[in-house]
Every structure is written in structure tokens, then in C-alpha cells.
Image (tube, coloured by chain):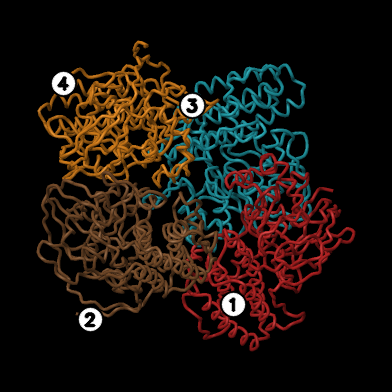
Chain colours: A red, B cyan, C orange, D brown
Amino acid sequence: MRPVVESGIAIPVPEQGAGRGERYRAIRAATLALAAPLSAEDCTIQSMPDASPVKWHLAHTTWFFETFVLGNHRPGYTFFHPAFRVLFNSYYNAVGEKHPRPERGMLSRPALDEVIAYRRHTDEAMLALLVEDESNAELAGVVELGLHHEQQHQELILTDVKHLLSRNPLKPAYHRQWPSTPIRASGPDWVCFEGGLHEIGHFGPGFSFDNETPRHRVWLNPFRMASHPVTCGGFMNFIEDGGYRRPELWLSAGWDTVLARGWQAPLYWERRDGQWHTFTLHGEIPVDPGTPICHVSFFEAEAYARWANARLPTEAEWEVAARNAPSAGNFLESGALHPLAAREHPADGMLAQTFGDVWEWTRSEYAPYPGFRPAPGAVGEYNGKFMCGQYVLRGGSCATPASHIRPTYRNFFPPDARWQFSGMRLARDA
Amino acid sequence: MRPVVESGIAIPVPEQGAGRGERYRAIRAATLALAAPLSAEDCTIQSMPDASPVKWHLAHTTWFFETFVLGNHRPGYTFFHPAFRVLFNSYYNAVGEKHPRPERGMLSRPALDEVIAYRRHTDEAMLALLVEDESNAELAGVVELGLHHEQQHQELILTDVKHLLSRNPLKPAYHRQWPSTPIRASGPDWVCFEGGLHEIGHFGPGFSFDNETPRHRVWLNPFRMASHPVTCGGFMNFIEDGGYRRPELWLSAGWDTVLARGWQAPLYWERRDGQWHTFTLHGEIPVDPGTPICHVSFFEAEAYARWANARLPTEAEWEVAARNAPSAGNFLESGALHPLAAREHPADGMLAQTFGDVWEWTRSEYAPYPGFRPAPGAVGEYNGKFMCGQYVLRGGSCATPASHIRPTYRNFFPPDARWQFSGMRLARDA
Amino acid sequence: MRPVVESGIAIPVPEQGAGRGERYRAIRAATLALAAPLSAEDCTIQSMPDASPVKWHLAHTTWFFETFVLGNHRPGYTFFHPAFRVLFNSYYNAVGEKHPRPERGMLSRPALDEVIAYRRHTDEAMLALLVEDESNAELAGVVELGLHHEQQHQELILTDVKHLLSRNPLKPAYHRQWPSTPIRASGPDWVCFEGGLHEIGHFGPGFSFDNETPRHRVWLNPFRMASHPVTCGGFMNFIEDGGYRRPELWLSAGWDTVLARGWQAPLYWERRDGQWHTFTLHGEIPVDPGTPICHVSFFEAEAYARWANARLPTEAEWEVAARNAPSAGNFLESGALHPLAAREHPADGMLAQTFGDVWEWTRSEYAPYPGFRPAPGAVGEYNGKFMCGQYVLRGGSCATPASHIRPTYRNFFPPDARWQFSGMRLARDA
Amino acid sequence: MRPVVESGIAIPVPEQGAGRGERYRAIRAATLALAAPLSAEDCTIQSMPDASPVKWHLAHTTWFFETFVLGNHRPGYTFFHPAFRVLFNSYYNAVGEKHPRPERGMLSRPALDEVIAYRRHTDEAMLALLVEDESNAELAGVVELGLHHEQQHQELILTDVKHLLSRNPLKPAYHRQWPSTPIRASGPDWVCFEGGLHEIGHFGPGFSFDNETPRHRVWLNPFRMASHPVTCGGFMNFIEDGGYRRPELWLSAGWDTVLARGWQAPLYWERRDGQWHTFTLHGEIPVDPGTPICHVSFFEAEAYARWANARLPTEAEWEVAARNAPSAGNFLESGALHPLAAREHPADGMLAQTFGDVWEWTRSEYAPYPGFRPAPGAVGEYNGKFMCGQYVLRGGSCATPASHIRPTYRNFFPPDARWQFSGMRLARDA
């Protein structure tokens, strides 16, 4: 058992019970800390239309506060640069024009330095506002949304830059130092859950996105869930058993995708001399069979489940099962920017590694909960309009900030997306 | 009020309580009757990858019986042509090679005549088998499946040939004669339904596809449904109110589709001299505001619902609401191959035009019911593998054979598909 | 040596010295004779955007006479169908709207029968006009152009239907009967030609297209030409020597095309059990090494020449060398719709198989001759506007009507086109 | 008349009669000087597959010397980085693997700093070699080739970075300072040239690329050439006369391109408030009607010529006409990185602005001269394999180093390319 050694990327974490200003400061600083190991060149390139340059993430998260907080709540606020309103608008039609998404990599200007100045300028105005206007509930809500938004982009910074670095034949690491971690792997087990009427969705005082509401009833048949996520070892068995060559294991759209893109393994995997290797943010390593599989699409997860004579859980099953699971896990702050093998045995009847390490695909399309109402105004575009053609993932990953995740959290990506830290956990009817 | 006059296309209908042989004969004859107004040239062209030539439909439905019935249940059966096994396999990987779907329009040979001979050859063997082997339950099940499969393709023959004819600047009609129909349009109303635990899905002796099972419980909040489908008049209001130009009304993927394809109206609509016209199987006609809207995608249906301050129903809501609706409607056999205005007032608390006229988009992704198991063997590919990226439609259309539809029937198409007779009905939370 | 037996396709040939009416009648009848072995279904499909349905060829050649002769020279002429003016316009912007080229295969209507009626209607009016207006020189010129235009489409009917039939897994033959032909193959030899100032291009009384004019001087260095076209045997050696795998043999754009399309052999070639087979209009046959290679692109011809330590001739070299070559050859009328091995030894200093069998790619881009002026009016669009991005082929093929070819004739296709009967002859500096 | 003031970009120019080492030093330094106004971020992005990042240009030109000079002529030379052999190979198949062209913008590493270190490392080795091995003629030839190669990439650095900057909504200038220049515009005139046998192509001691040889005879008819390139004023007349809307003015492939890309003006032109503006390396300016048109494709040049009742010259005509034209012009070193109006009246019978300002499209496809032989070895891939589908441009531009151009120089680009400084000069038959 190797001792845990933190890597050199110091991610600022707000202390428990910190005030709003302090939380703002810590979360904003964490974003910059993630960019610290990168050069201006690293921060400028867009490696595919789905990904964005790090520089863009740094600017867009700032744009969010400038647009929805300072612009609305600070009379006479001077915008840092008039063109940024368009350049760094992601998809808010209600705000106005947007620079086209696939063009985000055309922007050598503003320079990284100017974007950092933009962050500083905005942070100063934000911190002043937070002090002055402490009791404004509407303001508090938008600031909170902005901070969770910022944390989402922290994860995207890592997954997007990982994709970029993987496209470079030099295979550069984001950060060489690999934290040593104690591994006490345990085989998967089945945990049983009772059927009946359950409630899922967010309710109560803490923050949630609008898509987690309203809390509502669902009827579930009794079901079982695997105690652990599927591992790389399991997935290698699937590959050796012809998993990528057997159409009967796949959804029709999945099989079409396998053929069209020539998929033969998870993203970032490469076979050399009879050994699978994978590209990580810490450089290339041999695949460790005991660690959770990641960088698989919904299609691959669903096919693997069929091969394993199981299925993916629905998001309702997942949420019910995850409720009393331990919330600790391998998150962004650990410095291990890759999934790790299980560090602890779960208690009886409890799932392990539920949070952190890898997002877990569910069988549920990302759809509105019964009675869902998007937030009013432009921020209503945050979630609702994407409820089509995507599938829900749950639980967070090794790139998710620890304070960002909760059992009701719904992440979502199209079924062919693989560049997130996406894995899976199996389910079966009881 | 004009009297109903049947058009000249005589669709054979099996009598109530007819034996299996008679039903087989009638349904197979109905398919040929649909091809009767068409030339060999009309039957040969594939107008887009999603559509198939009529000749292919005629052959593929025959292939289904030859492959799954005669090949499996008739020892020593001589296949009509060895190459047809591949040429007319639609998507059954378990059966073997398939002629690629986008290449279906490359087949000038076999000629239409040969395909009709193929049908005759197969029908003779089938009818002999049905007489001999009356008590074989497994056989009976596959034959029944084949007949419902045949009926699905009857509808596709009409929608596919409509698409082909619409691509011809001469705008040829499939069948000029337009049945006169008594119209007693009535404005839409809201019908209330109670929440609670409901059961949906097929159960019992009659035929259903595997995707309608198992019957299972769902929890529903109380809801309201419109008594009638949305009409062309309503949709024209949506267009005039800028419906196709306002991103806030659309799902993000829907808005992308509107921009990419330049949609400004439903498929087949054209505006000339201030009047909307639509292409129908009976030729081009001015749009009648009192008739149900059709040839709209899920995206358009969903946007319309938002504009109307309503939403699409889930498929569970639809099924619960449709249970006690009258089953009569404008189906294929009426000779009116276009949706008609409501002919009868519904009773209190009852939906009108639930079946026939237009398929109604629901908000539900086409997903497996809890506990779903595909049928064993190759026919297991019939439905299950398509459960991704599509949305459920309910109720049948003017091109659906009357005996083919039922309240639990789940049709499904991708959210951008428009060439089916697809419309919608609005829902609201109670 | 097998006796020559004509195949069953009787191609009408105008007698020497026949009057204009008789020539018109014979050439128009030849087009119909080519369509005779085909069904209406065969005549309807468009197998790729570059090819057109046979039905379209039958109609478009008729449109040419109706538009440029009857419409302009016959006051009060009633057009057969107003929509045909647009439907069958190929590319004449000056005439007005055109049905888009890739949509030619969407036209199940007009039916083949109607197109034949259209031909009859137009032929009657044409023959009447030709009798009445015998001395009108302008009229005579356009009619002559129309007849050569018709002959071009006769060749395209064969190459386009060959492409269509090749896409059908049933590999149907256009015409099974294969003419027996005496073969006396002789190895290739080099024939020397003197350098100096030469004149090329058309001059004098006979018909030529505008692109063959004006006759003009060119300076040529002394050169050598192969006595025979490159054979399939030679090309098989190229393949075995890695021709399709060695980038150094190819133009850069050619190599890109090889990789993008996965070319490994000429079009229609397929290797089975160690033997090359090729699809022909008479069905599939083993490749005969003694016959001229065909269905190769400019890129393949150019690469082969480099491999053979030679080069393609320029079109000026070709024309100078072809001047005193025998004009007899294997043309459309022979009934052998595939290149044949050399039937006669050429005389000393004379090229063999110069005309017929295969079109021969030259190294010359299709460009205007010095002083070139397109014909005035809409027919000026016939040739001039295509003078970009294409290469010149010379000599005619087995699908070219014998009376259509001449030494100054310039055919042209893009460098990646392979569905014509295109081969090559090598040249070298002296 | 404004005084000429050099802009701030100091381009080192080797002195007349400088030794090889000094020339090497000066030309290499000029490349770096061009990158000096750019940030590392500016140097990293690839704005379209046709263009390359500046960093790539800096590395690839270095790779050329390392691969073809040091690798071949310096036993035991240690390559700077083994991966660079593949990363910075442009298109030399004989050298081995290449990083794919459209992926050049994925390389955030090596950093710009490392590339500059790579240049320094290579320059040291090169300068040592040049001193030691002064009398090696083969070496001298490759070094000379490498220097002209470097100069070609100097021009590409400017055109590629101009394209990148133009894609940025902030419209950043490469270099704000705009040199004041004396303008004495003079209207175009026609200059006559005699027909007959002429010789073109390079012959003699100075450097030329292989594609300029061998010198050979061509027959020309008498012709006229415009004394000046076509101006922006002339081109604005073309636009106003419907030039981009009239198919009869265009080659067929050109018209297809106009429609497919929606061209309505030259690249970088934008109309605002009734005034044309153009983006330049010095920022956006109003279009000056007296300056030569640039950033037009061959298609636009050819269409303009037809509209002007003229034609493009052949490259032979251009070379014959340019022979006694003054060689002075607006080149890279002037600091005016945009075409300028004519500064001097030409003498009688002499063309003006023949060299510099804008490359002039000719009507000649880029084809091998009679007797052309590519250089032996890998550098034989430099020119010959691109002789297909491109058109010849002559005369150099405002971004061409003055010492790089000569009357026999053949530049070449595809007919739809617009991002070079490409304009035209009209010709007519005498």
C-alpha cells in the first residue's frame, strides 16, 4: 500500500462555513490553479467542436458573472470590453449574438494575459458587490449559480485539455506528478434495493440546478446494483470476447457509430506489444485492470451491460441506491486526475465509489421531471433546452470539485460522447 | 356537409372472426392494392435514405415470411432466389449480410413483376403451411408478427411514395380521387385526468409487439389533455407569430435543425400568393385550417406546445387518457389519405380523434419498459435495438390499417423526422 | 480465330451520302435501339450524381431539338409539355431554370412511354421542318450540332447504365450476347514523330465542335508514341508491383484520391480466387490481359506512365500522331461493348487502335485553343464553360458511334472520373 | 504625394554579393522578423486546412535544412528532436511519415520558444557546415533550394496569419503602422507584343526551381497586355454590374463555387454603409479604387476578364511580355503589406507593376514543361507532383521577398484559392 501523496496542483478549497466572498474567491482561484500548469499556447487551441480552449473557459465563466450579476445588479457597471459580450456568450440566445462554437479556437486575441486581467477586473467588482449587497436573495441565487457554473467548467477545462494533449504525437502530460494512492480493490457484489413508490429530485434549502426539480414520486420495481463501477479488467474481457465486433450486443445507433468511427477500445486506449496503454492527464500509463473504466460512451456502456447479462440503471434507481452511500471519493482536489481503484470496502447494502472517480451512465434520457419549470429569464436557458437526445450521468468524477456534487445531480451528454470521465455501474432486476 | 364517398383504392379487409388463412390473404392483398396505382418506375426509386422503394417494401415483407416462417418451419423449402436473402434483409444482423439501406434504390432488377412473382410463390407456400400446421403456437406467433409487420409497411409504402412524388416538380398525385367527408369541426377543449398509480403496457391475449410489454405501474400527477389534435389553423398562428424565428421556443437541438435545414413550415407546405398549400397523396390542396396538423417533427411539436403555453403529454399520460376514447377513426381503409377534420363531438371527459388521422408525438423517449425482454432469436432485433434517440408517437394515422392500432401501440421516430403523418395533441399539468 | 458475329443489338447506321432527314432518322433511332434491352425501371434510376437515368438522356436529347431548333425556327410550334423545358435542361443557364442534376433520378414521371411519345412528337415536327426548310444554313448547323449531341448521349447511355447495373449485387448484363472477334494481338512498339511547328485543330467543311477550333500552330519537340494502348496485362503488372501502394508514382492529388476512395484496381475490377474479373455490359468476365485497359482515371493513367518510365502524350502530340492512323476501329456499331485486343498490325510508323476501343487520356488540361470563341447564343454554353479542371481524352471508344469521331475531337473529364471507357497510350521524348 | 516611410518591421536583406553564410543568416533572420510582431498564441492556431500555424512554418523551414542538408551532408549530426522528423515533414513521402496537414493546429507543444531554439540549434550547425564545406556543389544546390524554400514560407506566414486574424471578430492588425507611399495612378493601356516562336523557361547560372525548366520554344499569336493590373475600382464596377449574379460570365466550376460559398466580393471585403472595406495586415481600411485588386480566385479573375471583353494571358504570353519590364516593385521589404497603386508610369511598350504588389493569375494550368524532369531524390517531390488542378500565377506580391522573384517564376494555386495576394492583368488577341 503506497502512501497518498498530493500532487503539486494546489486547488484552493473554501473552508466549511466560509462566507460568500470567501467561497467566491476560493472557487475562482481554483479555476486559475487548473490553468497554471498550461502555457498560453495550450490554452488557445480548440481540439474539436465539442471542446473549448481553456482560455475560453476562463473568459466565459467570467462573462457569466459580468452578464448575469454585474450587468443586472450593479447600476453603471463598466463592462471590461464591449466585444466580450458576444465573444464569450456560450449559448444564451436571450443575451444576444454569440461567437460560433466551432470558432472558439480562432481567437489568438484576447491573449491569455488579457483574459486573466478580465477575471481580475470582474472579481474586484464582484467582491465589492458581495460585501455591499449581502442581503439580496435574488443576487445570492445568481451568484451561487455562477459558482456552480464555474465548477462545471473546472471539470471541462481538464477534460478538454486532456483531449487536446492526446491529439499531440508528443503525448505531453498536463501534470507529471502522480499521487501515490493506497489501493485495496474488492470485487463487485450485488446490492439489493426495494421497489415501491420513491421520491427523487432535489428539495430543501441547499443549492440545486433547476433540472433536479421538482422532487416527485416514481414507482420502481425491486432491483439490484453492483457495489462497484465496472473496471478496466472487466472491459478488457469484453474486448477480448469480441465486444466491438458483435452487433447483437449493441443498440442499432451504437453499432452504426462503432462502424463509422472504427471504435475498438475506449477513448485514449492504445494497444502496443500486447498491452493496453491509456493516455492520462499525468501522461501515458499501462491500463490498470483494477480501476474503474472511463472514457466510454453511453453506447459502449449499454453494450457492455448486455454482454454482462445486466443492464444500466435508470437515474431513479441510481438516486435511490446512492442515497445512503458515503459521499467521500476521488475528486478534483485529490490531485489524482484519473480514476483510482476502490479504496474502501462499502458497508453491507451500500454502494462503493458512488461519488467521484467516474461519472456513471444511466439508461435514462435527459428529460424534464414532471412539473419542471425552467428558471425565469436568460438563465432559464441553462438546462431545459438541452433536454433532447442526451443521457443522464450521475455521481461525479475525479475531475469534479468535491463541493459540486450531490445525489440528485444530473449530468448529461450525447450517447456517443467519450471525452468526459464517463464509466458505468451495472444493474439488474431483483 | 358533403357525403362520404369512398375513393377508388379498394383495400381488402379481413372479416371479423376470419380464419388465419383468410386474414393472411386479405392483409397481403391489401399491400398489393396499395401498389396498384403505381407504375414500375414509381416503385423503383428511393427518394432519401430514410425511405425505401415500394418494390423493396413488397419484397421485404415477403422476405420476412420466407425467412422467419418458411425457412424455419418448412423443412426442404426452396427459397425463391438465393440473393434475395441478402437483398431484402432490412436490419437483421442475426440473419446475415444486408444490402446497404441507402442502396435500395439501385435495384432496377429484380423487376416489379419478379417481385410480384416472389410474393405469389411465397404466399402459396405460406397458405399451404397455414392449413397443414394449424395448431403450432410458435408458428402462429411468427405469422401474426409477420402480418403486423406487413401492415407497418403498408403505412410506409404510402409515406415513402408520398415523399417521392413530392420531389417531382410535376407534383403527381398518388390517387386523384378525394373522398368527400362530412366535417363538423369543434374547437378543442381540455379534458382532466386523475393522478396516482396507473398501469400501462400490453397484457392479455391479443397481439402486441414486445416493446409494449411488460405491463407495469407508473405514478402520474393529475393532468389535462386537449380534446382534439392541434389543427393547421393553430399552426398557422404559430408561424405568423414568428414560431420558426424565435429560438426561445425551441429545444437547442431543434433550433439547430431549424437553422441547418431552413425550416419555415411543416413538410410539404408551400406558400403562394398569400395562401398555404400542401402536397397530399391526392394532389396539392390549399391547407384547411380545421384539419389536424401533420408532417411536423418532434421538434416542431415541442416548440408549438411551448408557444401554446402547454406541453406534449408523456406516453403514459397519453395511454391513460386514450383508454376509453372511441376506437373509430380515419384509417387507411377510408380512402382519405390525408387527415380530416373532426367528424364527431367527443363525449364529456373523452378525447376525440385519438386514433387515426395523425400520429401524436409524445414527450417520451422510446425506451425499454421496466423488465423489458426482447423476443428470443433474430426477431428480437425487431424493436429493442432501436431504443435510443427516438421519440414515441401514439394513435395511428390516416395511413394506418384500422386493425393494426391499439391504445398500447408505440410508434417511434427520430425527433427530426417529418415524412410520417405525424402531428400532436397538447397536455398541461392539472 | 473466332468469326465475328454481330450481337443482337441492331444499331441503325445512316448510309453514306444519306440526306439530312435520313441521317436524323437513323441517329435518333440508334438512341432508341440502345434503350431497347432495358426495362422502364432500368431507365429510371440515377446511380450517382455524375450519371443520368437513360430516360433522362432520351428526353434531354429531344429537348435539345425542341429548344434550339423547333422553338427558334418553327413559329407557333407547340411544346410537348411546358414543364419539360425545365426538367430536361441540362446546364443551359441562358435557357432558364434547370432541374438540379442530382435530382434526375427522382422522376418516376414522366414515364418511359411518355418520353418515347415526346421523342415521336418532336421527331415528326423535326422531319417536317427538315423537308420544308432545306436551304437554311443556320438551321442546318444547329441540327448537325443536335445530332452530334445525340451521339454523345448514346455513349453516355451505355456508360451510365453500365454503372447502374454494376451497383446491383445480381450483376445483370445489359446484353448477354458477346460478339466473337478475331484476335491477333501484337506487342506494343514505339513509333517516332518529328518535332517542329505543327498545326492542330479543326479546319474545313466537315462538322466539328467549337472547342476544336481555331486551327493553330504548336511547336513540338520530337517524340515517340506506343503503337498500341496499354493493355490489362500491363496494368496487372503495375498492380503487382505495388502501383496502388507507392506514393512516389502518383501526382499528389491522385494519391489523395487513391487513399480517400480506397482504389486498388480499375473500376469494375474484382479479384476472386487469384483471378481478376471485370464487369462488362455483357456480364462479368475474367480480365483478358491482351485487351486495352479501361475504366481508369487520369490519375491512374498518369501513375502507370511514370511507373513504365514513360509519360502521357499531350493532346497536340496525340493529334499529330493520329493523323495518318487508320480510322477503322471497334465502335458502338460492332456490338462489342467492351474493348477488344488489336485486330490488325499497324503499318510501319503508324499507330494501331487509335480510334475506338478506349478513349485515351492525354496530359493536357482541357483549355481554350488560342483565339477560341464560343458559339454565339445559348449553345455557346456547350463547351467553353467547362474549360477548367478537366483533362482531354482522344480517339473514341467501343461505345462511340463510328461517325461521331475524328482526329481533332476533344473529349474531356475530371481527373478522377473512371466510368467512361477511358484508357491510355504511352509517349516518350524522342 | 506622401513621403515613403518604412514601417517598423525591419526585414533583414542580404547585401548584394554577400557570401553564402551571410545570405543564410539574413534570410533566416527575416523569417524570425516576420514572427516578431506575433504572440505565441498567434503563432499556434491553424485557421483552415490550407493554412499552417506560423510556428509550423518556423519549424518546417528548419526541418528542411536539417533533413536535406545536415542529415545528408553532416555525418553524425544529432537531430534536435526525433519526433520533429515526422511533425514538421510537410509532404515528402520519401522522407517517411508526416503529421497530417489538418492537424498542424493541434500542437501547443513544442512551444514557440522551443521552435526558436530548434532554429538556433540548426542554424549553428548549418553555419558551421557552410564554412567547412564551401566547395561542395551538391550541398550548395540544396542550401540554395532551402533558402528559396524559406522565402516561400515567409510569404505564407503573412498570408496565413492574415487569414487567422481576419477570423477574429476583434479584427486585430498584424502591424498597425502603414507606410506612406507616393501614389501617381495612371489608367491602364494596352501594350502590343509580336507573335512567333518564343522561348520561355529558365536557362543559365542563376537559381530556379525545377518547374521553370527546361527552357523551350512556344508559338504565340500576336497579343496585347494591359499595362497595369486590374484595380479595385474596376472590380467594383464588375460587382455593381451584377458580376457575382450572372452565370454567363463564369466557368461552370466557378459558378458552382460562387453559389456554394455565397461569394459576393473578394475575400476580406465587407460592405458597410455603402462603402467597401477590406481587412489588411495593417488593419481594416476603406477599399482604395486605385490599387490593384487582390484576394480574388482564378474563377473571379477569369470571370472579370470575360466581363471586360478580354481574357487572362497564358503564362507564356506573360513571361514574354514581362521580360523587359522593370524589376522594381512593392515587395515584402517595403513594409507595405498590401498592394499599392502604381508609383511610376511605364515606358512605352512596357508593362507596369509587373513584379510585386499582386500575383497575377494566368489562364495556364500548372503543367510540366516539355522535357521536364523533377530533381532526383526526395526534393523531386518539391514541385512535380502538384502539377494537376492548379493554375499558374506570375510576378510576386507585396509579401514576396524581392530577391525571390524572377520573370520565369511559376507560382501555382487551385482555382478557388483566395487567401494569397492574387490579382490579375488582362490580355487580348492583337
Picture residue at 45% right of the left edge, 26% below the top? C279
Q: Position of residue B76 (x, y in %)?
A: 68, 16
Quickly name the residue at label 3.
C276
- Label 1: state its secondary structure: helix
Q: Are marks 1 and 3 on the same chain?
A: no
Quadrant hosting residue C112: top left
Which chain is indicated by disc 1?
A: A
- Label 3: state its secondary structure: strand
Quickly name the residue at label 2.
D3
Three-letter amino acid code at the position of disc 1: Phe
Position above or below: B357 against D187: above
Q: Position of residue A422 (x, y in %)?
A: 69, 58
Quickly name the residue at label 1.
A65
Q: Nearer the viewer, mark 2 or mark 1?
A: 2
Quickly name the residue at label 4.
C19
Residue B220 seen in the current view: yes
Three-letter amino acid code at the position of disc 4: Gly
